[in-house]
């Protein structure tokens, strides 16, 4: 069975400081991993995805994530937060051959001026 | 190029009623999935449609049913509505069924309130 644990429900950073959103996954098979962002009253937007190529994945808006199999982690980082990054972030896993995406419970990112 | 479009955006229903939500996938996509997102939670997979057939189903009761049309658009039907069905219902589309190698696009959702 596949599952995702987002270790922080809320993260607050100051504008211009680094962002770290933590995610651990559980998967019986080779997983695909994703980070999605959801702004208020908006749909989900794909930030980046890992599908067994390079372990360091670069996404949109300066975000990146590193797949660490030994730690079963897929943390999301950004060197410098911007006010527009304030949103809900979801870590998502899907096993090879499965059609469903399994979402974590989300991390709300606040960016203070 | 329009992305995934859903209708209606908001609706209010009474317990016991039935509701139909609609989704048009992104151009070129043939697979539609539906997710339920309760307030403060991550989305949960309801089911996926491909070639007009339900291909996989999540842990949802039979009150939740769907349909896919020849033009790949889809409907989600919920019968005998319960207060707990109040949620944001998201439609996702992709080209092909698997998540690996496919980029899955989401619509902005339909907010359902059951009173």
Image (cartoon, grey):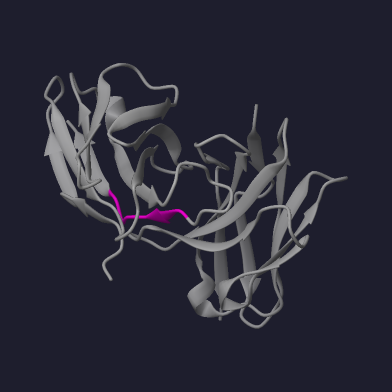
Quadrant housing the N terminus of chain B:
bottom left
Q: Quadrant of the C terminus of chain B?
A: top left
Between B47 and B70, the one nearer to me in the picture: B70
Up-down: is B33 above or below A56? above
Residue appearing at x 58%, y 56% in the figure: A35
Location of residue A108 in the rendering, given as x and y in whole percent from the top left corner:
54, 57
- Label total for image: 0
Q: Residue at x 52, y 41 (%)?
A: A101
Q: Is B103 left or right of A96, judged from the image as shown?
A: left
In-front residue for pair B65/B99: B99
Main SS class of the magenta portion in the image: loop
Front residue of this view, candidates B96 and A63: B96
**Percent of width and height locating residue A47:** 55, 64
Q: Residue B75, image x and y in percent? A: 21, 38
| Residue A95 % position (x, y) | 63, 37
Q: Which residues are drawn in magenta?
A: B104-109
Would you place residue B18 above or below residue A99 in this image? above
Residue at image point 44% right, 22% down: B59
Picture quarter containing residue A62?
Answer: bottom right
Task: Judge whether A80 appears above or below B79 on screen.
Answer: below
| Magenta-colored stretch includes residue B6 | no
């Amino acid at each position: 069975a596949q599952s995702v644990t987002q270790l922080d429900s809320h993260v607050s950073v100051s504008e211009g400081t680094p962002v770290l959103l933590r995610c651990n996954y559980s998967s019986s098979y080779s997983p695909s991993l994703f980070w999605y962002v959801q702004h208020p009253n908006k749909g989900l937007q794909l930030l980046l995805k890992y599908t067994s190529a390079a372990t360091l994945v670069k996404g949109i808006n300066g975000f990146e994530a590193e797949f660490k199999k030994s730690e079963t982690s897929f943390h999301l980082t950004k060197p410098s937060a911007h006010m527009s990054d304030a949103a809900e972030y979801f870590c998502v896993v899907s096993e090879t051959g499965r059609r469903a995406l399994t979402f974590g419970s989300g991390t709300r990112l606040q960016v203070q001026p | 190029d329009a992305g995934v479009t859903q209708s209606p955006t908001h609706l209010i229903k009474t317990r016991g009623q039935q509701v139909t939500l609609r989704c048009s996938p992104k151009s070129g996509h043939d697979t539609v999935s539906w997710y339920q997102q309760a307030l403060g939670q991550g989305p949960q997979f309801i089911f996926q449609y491909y070639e007009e057939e339900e291909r996989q189903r999540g842990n949802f009761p039979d009150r939740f049913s769907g349909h896919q049309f020849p033009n790949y658009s889809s409907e989600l039907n919920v019968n005998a509505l319960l207060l707990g069905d109040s949620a944001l219902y998201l439609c996702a589309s992709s080209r092909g069924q698997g998540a690996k190698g496919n980029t899955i696009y989401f619509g902005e959702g339909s907010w359902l309130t059951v009173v």
